[in-house]
Image (tube, coloured by chain):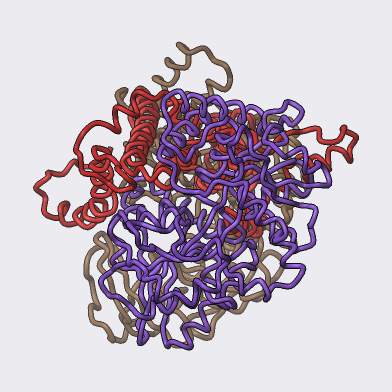
Amino acid sequence: MTKRIAGNGPVMGELNRRTMLKGMGGLGIAAAAGGFPQGAFASESLNYMCWEGYNAPSILEPFQKRNDATVSIDLITDSAGGFAKLAAGAYREFDLVSSDSPWIQRMGPAGFCRFIDDNDFAKQYSDFYPQFRAPFEPLQFDGKATGLPTRWGWVGPTVNTKFDKLETWSSYAPVFDAAYKDKICLLDWGDWPIMPLVLYAGINPYEELDQAALDEVRTVLRAAFKNTRAIVGDLAVAQKGLLDGSFRALIGGGTYCTSSLRLKGHDYIQSIVPDPKDGLKQGIIWMEATGLIDNGKDSKVAADFLKYIVSPAVAKELAITDATCNLVPNQKAEALFSDAEKSALQMDYMWTAWDNSQFHTVAPNIDDMLAIWQEELAAR
Amino acid sequence: MKIERKSWTDPVLIGSVTPLAAVMLFFFVIPLVMTTVLTFQTTQYYRLAWTWDLTIWTEIFSKPHYWTIMLRTVSMALICVVLSVLIAYPCAYALATRLKTYSTQIQILIIFAFLTDAVLKTFGWILVLDNNGVLNWLLAKVGFPPETLNLLYTPTATMIGMLYNLAVYPMFTIYLSLMRIDRDLILASYDAGASRLRTFFEVTLPLSKPGLYSGAVLVFVLSLGAFLEPRVLGGGTSPMASELIRQSFETRVNWPLGAALTIVLIVIGALTLAAFGFFTLRRKATKGGAA
Amino acid sequence: MPTPIIDAVDIVKDYGANRALHGVSLQVGAGEFVALVGPSGCGKTTLLKILAGFEDPTDGGLKIQGKDMRGVPAAARPTRMVFQKLALFPHKSVADNIGFPLKLQKVDAPTVKERVRAMLDLMHLKPEYLDRFPAQLSGGEQQRVALARALVSQPSVLLLDEPMSALDAKLKKSLQAELKKLHREIGTSFVLVTHDLEEAMMLADRICVMRGGNVVQIGTPTDIYYRPANMFVAGFIGETNFLPVDVARKGDAATVSSPLVEGQPTDMPADHISPDLTDKGPALLVRPETIRFVTGDPEPGLWVLNGMVDEFFIKGSSTQYRIRVSGLDAPLVMDLPGSIVLPAEVGQAVRVAFDPSRAFLLSE
C-alpha cells in the first residue's frame, strides 16, 4: 500500500498532489487520468512505472545506450494507487512495473501480467540467495511467476541506540508505555504502521479477520495514537526526530528508514525485528519486485530490462541510492558492497530478521483496517 | 444601477458568454458530473465496479468520523480566514500608506517568498517549531526554560503553516483595494472633521471591503484544500479533508469514496460561501443598493 | 478691509528641493468670494491645501478667524473643501454623505435629518435623492451634493478646488450662476481655485492671479481686466493684442511711440499705466473691440497699422478678424460688432486704427 515518501520524492509528489487537491472539482478526473507517461520515440521505447531508485540515471542510461532504447518513467508514490491506475486501463500503456511484491503478484489475478518463464531466467535465479530462487512463492500465481524480486528489507522498530537499548525494543511494548508518551513516531505510510501494531496485539493481520479481531485492531490503534507524538509521512522529518532524540522510535518503517543514515555514519541507528510473541512472528519482510505487463507488445527489450535490473552490478546500484539503502536478493552482488555498505544494510542481521518475520502480502481485511485507522485518527 | 438586464436571446450576449461557458463546462462542470457519477459506484479488489448504488453514500452518512473531519476542516478554514485577514490587513495597510517608498521592494520580497515552493517553506517551519527548533532556542535565549513551546505536530502548527502560506493572498487583494481608494476621499473625511481612526472605519475599511472579501474567499477555498500543512506540521493531530480524500483515493484505492468526500467538501464549501454572499449582499441591500 | 477671516502671510512651501510657494500673502474678508487663478503649477492648489490643513507651510503665518492655524489639523479647522473630483463617499448614500460632518459633530439624528433636508432644498435636489448613491447621480447633481456636504456644518470658509472643471460648458455656466447666488444667500467666505479666469471674473469679488509660486496681482475683476499688472495677467484674461512700444517716462507720466504705426507719440493717461510698469518689454495692451478699419484719413490721435486679412470668424454677435501686420509676431485680433462687415476676403490689404490713449501700458 502506501509506502515511504522519501528524500526528494515528496517534494515533487506532494506538490503535484497539492495542486491536484486544490482543484477539487477535477479531483476524480485527475486521479482517473493520472498522467500517462509520454513514450519517447527512439528505436524502441519502454514505459516503466516504478518507485524512486529504479529511475536513477546510473541505472537507466547504460541500458538505454546499449539497447538503443528510451525508458519513460512514471514514479509511484503509492503502491496501491499505482496498481489501481494500471488496473483502470493504464496497463495498456506500460511495459514494466517495479512495485511492492503483493501488487506485482496481484497483476496475475487482475489479468494483465506477462508471466515469466522461470527457465528463461535460470541464470538470474542462480545469482539469488537460496531464499529467493524459483519457484519464489510470494510472486507465484496459478503456478506461474509474476515477476522477479528486486529489493527487500524488514519492518520493525527503528531505534536510536544513543537513547535506547536494543533490548527495550525486543517487543513493541514501549509504543504503549506511558514512559514513552509523545516520543513515538508512526510513519504515515498506509498499512505499514498498522501491521506491526496488529501483530503486537496478537493478531495475524495477513489472515482473514473476524469482527472481534477488528475490534481488537481498533483498540490497539487507539492505544498507540494516545502515546504517539506524531504521524509523519516524510522520511527525512522522521529521521531528523530520531537523530535528535525527540522520537525514540519510528514504527512502520524498518530498514527503509535506517540504512541511508547508517551509511552516512549514524551507525547507532538500527532497525530490528522484535522477538516472536506467543508464537506470532513480530517482524515483517517487505519486498519489491519487478514484473512485465501484458500490453500485447510482448517486448523483448522489456524482458531484457528485467534481466538487467536484477543483474549483480545493477542490483548494487539499486541497493544504494541517495535517499534510501535497501537489501537486494542478488547473492552475487554481495561481493560488490564495501564493508561500510554491508554494515549500513545490517547484512549481519538480515537472516535473523528473515527468520522472525511474516512475509508482507496484501492483507484480506486491509481496507477495514485502513478505515479504522482513519476513524481513530479523526477521533484523536 | 447602470447594468441593463439583457435578454437571453441577445446574440451579442450569447456570443460573448459562450467561450467562457464552454471552458467552464469542460473544466468544471463535466469533471464535477463525472465525480458525482463515480460516487454511485463501488470498489472491488482495487478495481472500480459499476454498481450504481448508494453504498458509498450510506457509508458516508453512517460514519461520524467523515463528518468530524469535514467539520474540523471547515472550522480550521474559518479560523484561518479570520486570522489571515487580521494579519494581512495591517500589513497591506502599512504597505499602502506608511511604507510607500519601500513598497516595491517589499512587494518583490513578498512575491519571491510567494513563489518559493510551498513544500519547502512548510518543511522549513519544522525547523522553527520543533521542540529543539529556532523558536524555542530564541525563547531560551531570552530566559524562558528550555523547550517552552510544544508546537510541532499540533493543530496550532498546522494553523501557523496555513497562515504563512495563505495570508499573502488577502495581503495582496487588500493592498490592491487600498491602493484604489482615492486619497481625496481620506482628505474629505478629515476635512469633514473625522479623526484618523474614524476615517479608517468610515471610509478606508468600507472601501477596502472588495479586497477583504475576495482575500477571505481565496483563503477559505484554499484552506478547505489544505493538504501539506496538516500532513507535515500537524503530524496526524489535525487531519483535514484533503488528506482524507487522498487516503481514500490512493491508500484505500476507493475512488467512489474519495469522489463522494470530494463532493461533500465542495458542497460544504459552496454552502459556506453562499451564506457569506447572502449575508453581505443582504446587508448591502438594506443599505439601499449598491453604489 | 475689516478683520479678515483668512490672514495668510508670507507662506512658503517647499517639496524637497522644489519651492512651490515663494512667500504668498492673502487676506480673505468675511463673506468675500476670492478666486485663486493661474496656470497649472502656479501654486494655487498648494495654497488651498495649506488653508484646508492638508499641507503644512514650510514658513509663514496663517490665521483663520484670528486663530493661529499652526498644528491645527484639517478636521479642527472652520474650513470645508469641495474637491476637484468631488470626493463623495461612494459607499454612503446622499443623505449619509451630506450628513457626515454633522454626524462627526455628534449632532442628534433628527437634527441631522432636518439639516440635510434643508441643504437638499438649498441645492435644488429632490428629496428622493437622499437614499441614492453618488454613482447614481449625474455630474451636476454630484456637484450639488458635494457642495451640500461642505456647507451643511456651516463653515466660515468654503474652499473650492476647481470643482467645475470636469463639467460640460453648458452645465458649468448654470452651476456658476447658482454658485454665485448661493454665495450671496449664505454669506460664507468662498475661496475658489480655478485656471479659468473667465470663471473667476464671473464669480469672485477679488481675484488673486498667481504664477510660479508668487502672487502676480490681487484685485477686483475690474482691476484685473482693465488694469492688469503685466502682460501675463492681461494675456490670461483672453484674446488680446500687445503692441511693443518705446516709452519715455517723466515721473509718473509716460509717452509712447512705435515705429510700426502711422501716428504721433502719445502721452498715456496716468490711470492707463500699470503701477508695476518696468522697462522690460513695454507694450500697449490693445483690446480687440477697440480696433476699427479705416478708409481714407484717420482721425487725429489714432494710430494706424497696415496689414492684410489672415482669417476671419463669425462669432454671432460679432465678427473676429485676424490681421497680419509686418513687424508683429502674432496677428492682430479685432472684434467688430455685428455680422459680416467688410472686408470679407482673406488676403485683402486693410488699414486698421485704434486710440493709443485708450489702450493700457504695461510690461512683461
The image quadrant where one finds the C terminus of chain A is: top right
Q: Quadrant of residue C28?
A: top right
Q: Pinpoint residue B44: horizontal percent, then vertical percent.
A: 29, 43
The residue at 37%/27% (across/down) is B275
Furthest residue in direction left, as rendered: B9
Q: Residue at x 69, y 32 (%)?
A: A173
Residue B113's place in the image compared with A371, above or below, is: below
Instruction: Write the residue at 52% across / 60% down.
Output: A12
- Residue C43, percent across and down? 62, 55
Name the one closer to the observer, C257 or A257.
A257
Question: Quadrant location of residue A338?
Answer: bottom right
Provide the letter of the chain coloured brown.
C
Q: Can residue C177 be seen from the camera position used here?
A: yes
Q: Which chain is red?
A: B
Can I make out residue B217 in this image? no
Q: Tell me: residue C10, above or below residue B210.
A: below
Q: Give how far across and how far down residue A243 sits, in percent.
A: 77, 49
Which colour denotes chain A?
purple
Q: In this view of the protein, which residue sits in the foreground, A251 or C78?
A: A251
Whether residue B174 sits left or right of residue A157 in the image: it is left
> Residue at (60%, 56%) from the top-left corner?
A153
